[in-house]
Image: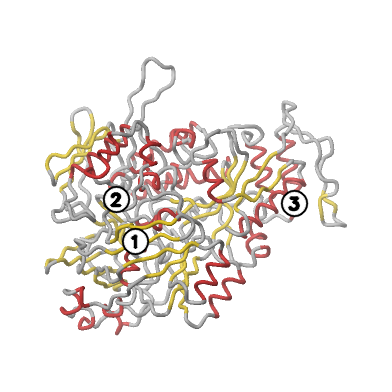
Amino acid sequence: MRLRTKLLCLLAMLALVAAACGEDEEAPEATAAPATETTAAPAPETTAAPDEPEEMDEPEEMDEPEEMDEPEEMPMAATYRLGIFSAPTTDNPWAALDTEAEIWNTYVIPGQMSLYTYQGPTYTVVPALAADASPPQVEADGDGYSVTVNLRSGVTWSDGTPITAHDAAFTFNTIKKYNGLGGNFTSAWPLARDDDPATEEDESSQGVSAVEALDDLTVKISFNFEPGLAIWPMSVGLGSIFQEAFWGPIVDESADAETLYAASGLGAPNASAFDSVEWEPGAFWRNVALDEYYDSGSQYTVYSSGAVEYTQDGATETWGGDPGGDVLADYTEGPFISESIYSIYTDQNAAVLALTEGEVDFLLNPLGLQAGLRNEILAAPALEVAVNDQNGMRYLAYNTRKFPMSQAPFRQALACMIDKDFMANTVLGGTAYSINSLVPPGNAYWYNPDITAPCAGQTSQERVASAVQIFKDAGWTWEVEPVWDEGNRDVIPKGEGLVGPGGETIPPLTLLAPGPGYDPMRATYSLFIEEWASDLGIPLTAEPTGFSVIVDKVFPPADPLGFDMYILGWGLTPFPDHVFDFFRSSRDSALGGYNTPGYANPAFDALAEQFDKAKTLAEARDLIHQADAIIAEDLPYVTLFNTPLIEAYSNQLTFPYTTILDGLQNVGALTGVVTIS
């Protein structure tokens, strides 16, 4: 049984040996649809050319017993060297799913267990710890509902001990002890809450009410409502499970989540093929392969239909429907390396230089490459390049808890000034593309092509006129109204003395954005937004800020009113429940969720409750499109751009497939985790 907690671990394990499985070329186009509406996420569309049939149809190259059944005889690379250019901030896997959900932490920390997981490259939902090929159905149970899941035997933690239903129950009880935790926990394990009759507010919430170990290999999950597929299986079924033996004593001694998060997780038992053994903050992180990994030697065959054939110890199971279409991947599970070392570089330039000079084998880069660095990589003779769509976005967020960001006309007028196509095509030199939907176009099934940008297609002159009119219609006034000067093709005079409809003056505002060393694209974008704001008379200053500093300010905010606007990015999951999780009022970041704008809209919350109960993919997609349209109009976020994911690696490496949404370095999408980048 293959636990796909981290695709990156898979790639590291298969590097240098995938050729033995007949995978020398790019994978064919992924067009899989789910076998059933509750067991598979629709495979994203891709544009890669298919493999030649002879590479896919030679079983003698894929099934040699000497190579498949005796992994100790496989070629062993002593060290797999990876480059990153932002330092991990924690070694605690609980914190990495909550307050420290930075993509750099997720890259290096070995993965945990889950009942089900995504199988790349099709994103079919397949068993991990569960024994049931498809997630069991929820049934009425007393005053609520429940689902009982059978578990596999022989699945072990990295310390060799069995993973059992008691670990799942412990995980939920820990989350419950700390009132639900935050970050990814709020969606993966949503906590059922009763209303406190002593208060005026309704604190009740729908979610998981209990997780019980009926025996070592049977877990019962209870809900206080009838959950739709967004909750079961697409959230709870993919939620992380932690080992009780290691973490139980730490939880017992931790009165609050902050104390738990302060505990070191270096070397803590996990469910991957690696243990973390060494972390030199600011320098490197090292993981070592297990001597015995429970899934080593298993065989995986993934079809374009979405089906997966899994063979272990001579027995074959089929998940996700009937095999059909092209074979997208056919490989044997490792590990085939002894260790992986993640070296930390000061910025993108230094990391790319290390890659081109052979200091590292693979560069982890979720941000996209500026033109100059892209050209360096493409020109390097010892490197191979893979290009994939990215399931993520860069965005501008308004803090709607405070004036003037609390006013929709303010948000809409400034968004109208932002010419996303001009930025992507001209300023960023075509290295990015503008996005309007909260679901990136690469996630084709869920993407809404009808969402348009504010003031889309307008000239600069027309944008100024439209923004001014938005303010006027809402009762805003200026001492000096901004005017477009056709002769100078600029705003002359710029706006001065802008005041709200109630006479409120605008205080100096700050736009936090990563600096040019971390991400020159977002740094550049922030300067243009500053200029457009100035044209309208908005006193906004773009402030280059360390990535982790921004994250600390807003996830969760120590002071919910302590920031005005910021630019960051998200790495997303194939099932886009983030559209609701980022904006429902119960997920306010001040409460530990990912709603950093503090956005509150009763109509949106009502739509989110419908989404939680949706039973089919089609119903869920319709609700996501409706929610997307609300946010595109109300604009607590302005989605800005995305970049093609260009990944370069040593030509000494061979991967089981190279075409997958989010690329070879994909982490969050295959763990049911959203990450901050």
- Tell me how far mark 3 sits from mark 2, CA to CA: 58 Å
Q: Amino acid at mark 1?
A: Asn
- According to the image, label 2 marks what residue? 268
Q: Residues within 10 Å of mark 2 (few under 14, many from 20)?
A: many
In the picture, measured across the screen, residue 513 lies left or right of residue 258, that is right
Frontmost of labels 1 and 3 is 1
Compared with residue 109, is residue 148 higher up or lower down, i.e. above or below?
above
Tell me if 542 is positioned left or right of 677 in this view.
right
Q: Which residue is rendered at x = 49% and y = 41% of the image? A: 555
Q: Callout 3: 10 Å neighbours few (<14), some, many (20+)?
A: some
Q: Amino acid at mark 3?
A: Glu
Question: Answer yes or no: do the residues labelled 3 and 2 have beta carbons within 8 Å?
Answer: no
Amino acid carrying mark 2 in the image:
Ala
Q: Quadrant of the N terminus?
A: bottom left
Tell me how many marks there are.
3
Label of residue 287 in the image: 1
Does 263 sit left or right of 85 as displayed? left
Residue at screen point 37% across, 58% down: 278
Say the numbered circle drawn on residue 462: 3
Given residues 350 and 434, the one toward you in this image is 350
